[in-house]
Image: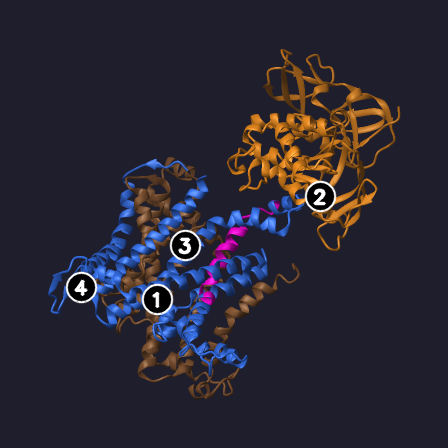
């Protein structure tokens, strides 16, 4: 669409700008401010330069949290994206059952995040939770409060439960945009099921899948509430991902400088990965 | 292969429903029965937990608080985003692309990073522990989202409609409210749904910015849990009740959800 | 390639059709000759798409059989029928190049690689897409995309028929003509049976050897473009084909005498007595206007000058009655219509009645 040059349009954007700036710029400045200062209380601050940054970047603790964060995010993406696509492909294309599927599948997306955590906290308990009890009944020794591996498994399973539907809905919407005649033409051309997926469905889903991957990346990279309520980052540090570590540092230890420096590093990383991903997919679209 | 296709979504839905069923199951048990051991159904079916929630003001005010700030946030987000989305969809102006990208980066801001600065910011302007504070804080991620979705819907409306309306002598506000908004009605619905959803589920900021007066229901749950020991039945019932508003909203917008996503703008 | 036989075919979308009105496609019995170019012409909702879907195998007819050659294919799925189809909106595989698009149906059928390369290269030449062979199909124009959809059918050489479902809808007007010519050319070159669905009479008449005109689920006439013009078998065909359409006015007929507007016209044929609705039809091309009171009085409402000829829109006993006059013809103020009796058709309940000589 041809747009008209009109700088007065700024006035229409202004309210949004003000409210988002209040929420984004002021706190960000506060964080930056903390990240370069130190305090002994009483609101007396000393300029520390990049000390907190170098300290954070060199610390074992940060490396550990970062490593756990990346493996969590990678695992989540590797499971949720293909699973979501597979479910969307198998869903009815229209009618009553399609509505039923959509409503039921969207349900986990609308549960407050700490309720999700609390719900899984109980659901996975080995003595009274269905999952924990069931696994032990099957002869698998499982206790997420004691075994790091079990805790890790539970956090991932919970995230799959919570967020795969988002991928399903996005992929489903992409599939809905395919005209019926494409399937007919493919049938006439003698295309196999795989060829239909590869050359018709996947290209049409590419755009929504980009969004799905970006959203799941950002949100899983920021994940805090659900694993915190579920495991509190434990046992030990086994499920302490970036956000949990950050809040521990800021509120638990009141180490504002460290926490702020971590915040900034962390925010920049999200931004960088998203920007890279965005640029690469955009480039792929152009050529 | 094709005959068994229905199995995939069915198994997935079973997987989704089991934890919810477990919560529901527990909400009808007494705390003693829950702690007593594993059982598929409540042995002594009781609605005591629900009665307690609906009669105890500390509980039900939590619901009212949550709904108040979520509603407030939805109204603010949509009404602020409407003119901005219109500007992005219809005009080119100095720095428009950068502004749009900057807005979207706020969707990436981790709430954990902002919790503490938010607390200081809203305390200093005297809004701490009010519905407005939470509603405004949630604008951080909901306004960019709303602008993004609405811009998609608006770009789908041909520009000729605007031009015809101006030629017919409509003023901008009258055109916008009488002609344009009805045209993107479903878009506004979808946007409101997503604003509602993300504000309803977010808890970290909502908890940090409130203490007594505006405390959200989910925060009441965790605080009650730590003060009065483990009243699991009560917690489960409260959890079930937090699912209900979402379920109602989904039911009403079920036909629009896929469409909203199809705009490729979520 | 094969001839296509429609054997007492009928279709209803209702599970238990009650009477004629429930049928989207009323009974049709016809043989499409091998290598013919046919057009299915009619307004939207006339059942032409239903018929096309039955031929392509997307629909199984409620009654009757469909045969390709001697083989009964009524229950076959589209891919078993070995047909090709070009849809209203171009269907191409966006992520593939033009050459890959054309190769796709052959690759799926496991044709040897060198054979594929040869056929695709030929097809690209035939379709004039030489310079675009290795371009992504996504950025092409609508007419190029339609050529590719057609090419995907043609590369298969042995298809039983190629079906077209309003293929020129999204093509720019000046390219429509080009693409239609190309289609004609390919028909001559490859000799496939082609069935072309359209609601545009120009497309149908220029493309097809035989036009099948459909109206409200019924095939009202099958004939060459000349036959449709000279002897419409149904008043609808008269209206629908020709511009302006045929004049149809109620009249009464006794033997070889026709009573119209208080005048009597001698017909070249005799007709048995007719019950029910009787109409006469004559094309505006065979109507002359006279100033001296000869013929049936009409009142002229407008005259459209089209350049090579004039269209006179008039009323005869309150019904629209048009005449096409040559360029420069006088338009009298007090006009009456003189009708060529040999060009008059008599219609009984909308269907043409053939008299005895």
Q: Where does residue A206 sit, x and y in percent of width and height?
A: 49, 49
Q: How far apart are the two marked residues, 1 and 4, measured between alpha carbons?
A: 31 Å
Tell whether position A169 is magenta. Answer: yes
- Mark 3 closeness class: few <14, some 14–19, many ≥20 residues within 10 Å: some
Q: Nearer the viewer, residue C22 or B227?
A: B227
* C247 relative position to B142: left or right: right
Which element type, helix, strand or loop, lies under badge 2? helix
Q: Which chain is orange?
A: C
Mark 3 vs mark 2: in front: 3
Mark 1 or mark 2: which is in front?
1
The CA distance from mark 3 to mark 4 is 35 Å
- Left of B175 or right of it: where is A57? left
- Image check: B252 left or right of A53? right
Tag 4, which secondary structure? Answer: helix
Q: Give the residue drawn at x 27%, y 43%.
A: A10
Q: Do the residues at discs 3 and 4 belong to one chain? A: no
Chain with colour brown in the figure: B
Give the percent coordinates (x, y) of residue C318.
67, 28
Q: Looking at the image, is mark 1 or mark 3 earlier in the sequence?
A: 3
Image quarter where the N terminus of chain A lies is top left
Percent across and percent down for residue B65 are 32, 70
What label sits on residue B124 in the rendered view?
A: 4
Check disc 2 and report the residue beneath it: C56
Q: Is residue B61 in the magenta section?
A: no
Nearer the observer, B262 or C162: C162
Specify the label residue A214 is tagged with: 3
The residue that label 1 is drawn on is: A241
Chain letter tied to blue: A
The quarter holding residue A58 reads bottom left
How far apart marks 3 and 2 lie (CA) works out to 42 Å
Indicate the chain on which mark 3 is placed: A
Compute the Cα span from label 2 to label 4: 73 Å
């Amino acid at each position: 669409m041809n747009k008209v040059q009109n700088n007065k349009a700024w006035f229409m954007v202004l309210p949004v700008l003000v409210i988002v700036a209040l929420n984004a710029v002021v706190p960000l400045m506060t964080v930056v401010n903390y990240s370069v200062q130190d305090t002994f209380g009483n609101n007396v601050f000393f300029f520390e330069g990049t000390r907190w940054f170098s300290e954070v970047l060199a610390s074992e603790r940060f490396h550990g949290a970062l490593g756990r964060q990346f493996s969590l995010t990678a695992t989540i993406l590797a499971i949720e994206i293909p699973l979501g696509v597979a479910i969307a492909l198998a869903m009815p294309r229209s009618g009553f059952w399609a509505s039923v599927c959509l409503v039921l599948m969207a349900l986990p997306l609308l549960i407050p995040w700490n309720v999700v955590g609390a719900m899984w906290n109980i659901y996975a308990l080995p003595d009274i939770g269905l999952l924990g009890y069931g696994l032990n009944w099957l002869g698998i020794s499982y206790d997420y409060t004691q075994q790091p591996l079990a805790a890790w498994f539970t956090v991932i399973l919970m995230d799959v439960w919570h967020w795969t539907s988002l991928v399903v809905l996005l992929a489903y919407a992409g599939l809905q945009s395919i005209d019926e005649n494409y399937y007919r033409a493919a049938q006439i051309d003698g295309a196999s099921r795989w060829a239909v997926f590869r050359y018709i469905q996947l290209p049409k889903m590419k755009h929504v899948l980009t969004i799905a991957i970006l959203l799941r990346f950002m949100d899983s990279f920021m994940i805090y509430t659900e694993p915190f309520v579920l495991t509190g980052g434990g046992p030990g540090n086994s499920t302490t991902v970036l956000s949990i570590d950050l809040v521990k540092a800021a509120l638990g230890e009141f180490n504002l400088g460290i926490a702020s420096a971590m915040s900034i590093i962390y925010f920049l990383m999200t931004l960088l990965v998203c920007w890279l991903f965005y640029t690469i997919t955009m480039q792929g679209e152009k050529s | 292969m094709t005959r068994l296709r229905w199995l995939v979504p069915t198994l997935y839905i079973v997987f989704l429903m089991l934890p919810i069923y477990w919560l529901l199951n527990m909400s009808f048990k007494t705390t003693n029965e829950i702690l007593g051991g594993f059982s598929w159904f409540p042995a002594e079916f009781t609605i005591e937990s629900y009665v307690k929630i609906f009669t105890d003001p500390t509980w039900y005010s939590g619901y009212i608080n949550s709904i108040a700030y979520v509603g407030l946030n939805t109204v603010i987000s949509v009404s602020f985003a409407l003119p901005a989305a219109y500007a992005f969809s219809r005009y080119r102006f100095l720095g428009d692309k950068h502004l749009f990208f900057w807005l979207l980066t706020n969707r990436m801001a981790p709430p954990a990073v902002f919790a503490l600065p938010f607390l200081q910011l809203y305390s200093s302007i005297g809004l701490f522990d009010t519905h407005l504070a939470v509603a405004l804080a949630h604008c951080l991620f909901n306004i960019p989202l709303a602008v993004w979705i609405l811009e998609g819907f608006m770009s789908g409306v041909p520009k000729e409609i605007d031009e015809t309306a101006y030629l017919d002598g409509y003023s901008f506000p009258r055109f916008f409210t009488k002609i344009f908004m009805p045209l993107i009605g479903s878009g506004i619905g979808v946007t409101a749904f997503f604003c509602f959803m993300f504000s309803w589920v977010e808890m970290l900021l909502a908890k940090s910015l409130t203490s007594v007066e505006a405390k959200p229901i989910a925060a009441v749950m965790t605080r009650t849990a730590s003060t009065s020991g483990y009243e699991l039945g009560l917690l489960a019932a409260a959890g079930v009740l937090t699912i209900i508003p979402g379920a109602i909203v989904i039911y009403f917008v079920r036909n629009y959800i896929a469409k909203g996503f199809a705009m490729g703008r979520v | 390639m094969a001839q296509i036989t429609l054997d007492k075919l009928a279709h209803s979308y209702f599970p238990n059709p009650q009477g004629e009105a429930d049928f989207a496609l009323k009974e049709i019995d016809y043989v499409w000759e091998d290598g013919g170019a046919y057009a299915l012409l009619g307004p939207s909702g006339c059942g032409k798409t239903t018929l096309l879907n039955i031929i392509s195998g997307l629909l199984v007819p409620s009654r009757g059989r469909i045969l390709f050659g001697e083989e009964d294919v009524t229950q076959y799925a589209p891919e078993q029928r070995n047909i090709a189809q070009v849809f209203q909106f171009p269907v191409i595989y966006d992520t593939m190049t033009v050459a890959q698009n054309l190769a796709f149906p052959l690759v799926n059928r496991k044709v040897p690689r060198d054979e594929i390369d040869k056929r695709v290269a030929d097809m690209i030449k035939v379709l004039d897409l030489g310079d675009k062979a290795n371009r992504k199909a996504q950025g092409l124009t609508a007419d190029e995309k339609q050529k590719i959809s057609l090419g995907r059918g043609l590369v298969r050489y042995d298809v039983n028929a190629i079906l077209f479902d309003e293929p020129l809808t999204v093509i720019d007007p000046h390219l429509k003509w080009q693409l239609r010519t190309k289609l004609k050319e390919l028909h001559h070159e490859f000799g496939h049976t082609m069935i072309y669905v359209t609601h545009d009479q120009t497309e149908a008449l220029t493309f097809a050897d035989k036009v099948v005109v459909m109206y409200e689920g019924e095939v009202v006439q099958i004939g060459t473009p000349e036959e449709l013009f000279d002897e419409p078998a149904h008043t609808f065909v008269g209206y629908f084909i020709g511009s302006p359409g045929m004049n149809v006015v109620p009249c009464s007929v006794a033997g070889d005498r026709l009573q119209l507007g208080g005048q009597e016209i001698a017909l070249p044929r005799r007709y048995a007595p007719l019950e029910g609705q009787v109409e006469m039809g004559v094309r505006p091309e065979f109507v002359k206007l006279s100033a001296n009171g000869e013929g049936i009085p009409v009142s002229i409402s407008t005259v459209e000058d089209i350049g090579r000829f004039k269209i006179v829109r008039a009323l005869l006993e309150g019904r629209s009655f048009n005449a096409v006059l040559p360029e420069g013809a006088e338009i009298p103020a007090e006009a009456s219509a003189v009708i060529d009796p040999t060009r008059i058709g008599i219609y009984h309940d909308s269907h043409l009645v053939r008299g005895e000589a």
